[in-house]
Amino acid sequence: MRTANRLRPTFRTTIGLALATATVALLTSACSMQQATCGGDEYPVLSVGGPGKACVPDDEEPPKGYARYPEGKVPEHEGDKWSTYWSTRTLDENGRTIELPDEN
């Protein structure tokens, strides 16, 4: 009986540590489960005057017809605040934010 009583607290500690480790793993992996807007060494750009987006290598300027997102309004993950915002807006040729026309 004495051996069984000694093992019981160790078993509880092991179970507690396993549950804590699993919880931490789930919480930290939740962020990585979101799909990034662009891959490493790239930044997102949006189409000027119409719908569309692309990714451009960090060391290049946006191609003709595309522009950088305004500072502080850059989407980082699909479905985040700015990704949702820009799904109904774009920039005009003067850099002003405009609404996209409805697709009916």
Image (spheres, rainbow, N blue to C red):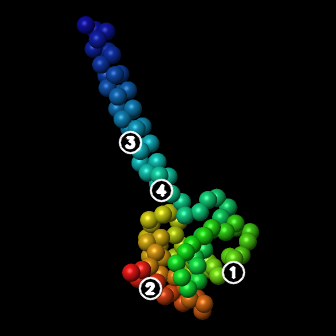
Q: Amino acid at mark 4?
A: Gln
Marks 2/4: CA distance?
28 Å
Q: Nearer the viewer, mark 1 or mark 4?
A: 1
Q: Secondary structure at mark 4?
A: loop
- Pointer 2 residue: 101
Q: Residue at x 60, y 74 (%)?
A: 45
Tag shown at residue 23:
3
Tag shown at residue 100:
none
Q: Nearer the viewer, mark 2 or mark 4?
A: 2
Tag shown at residue 64:
1
Marks 1/2: CA distance?
22 Å
- Pointer 4 residue: 34
Q: Position of residue 84 (x, y in %)?
A: 43, 72
Residue farthest to the front, as pictured? 104
Q: Nearer the viewer, mark 2 or mark 3?
A: 2
Q: Residue at x 74, y 69 (%)?
A: 59
Q: Label 3 neighbourhood size at 10 Å, few (<14), some (14-19), many (20+)?
A: few
Q: Which of disc 4 and disc 2 is earlier in sequence?
A: 4
Q: Position of residue 43 (x, y in %)?
A: 63, 68
Residue 96 shown left or right of residue 8 in the figure: right
Residue farthest to the left, as pictured? 1
Marks 4/3: CA distance?
18 Å
Q: Residue at x 38, y 26 (%)?
A: 14
Q: Amino acid at mark 2?
A: Pro
Q: Which of disc 3 and disc 1 is earlier in sequence?
A: 3
Please identify the quarter of the rendering in which residue 85 is found: bottom left
Q: Residue at x 46, y 84 (%)?
A: 100
Q: Quadrant of the N terminus?
A: top left
Marks 1/4: CA distance?
29 Å
Q: Is residue 35 above or below residue 44?
A: above
Residue farthest to the top, as pictured? 1
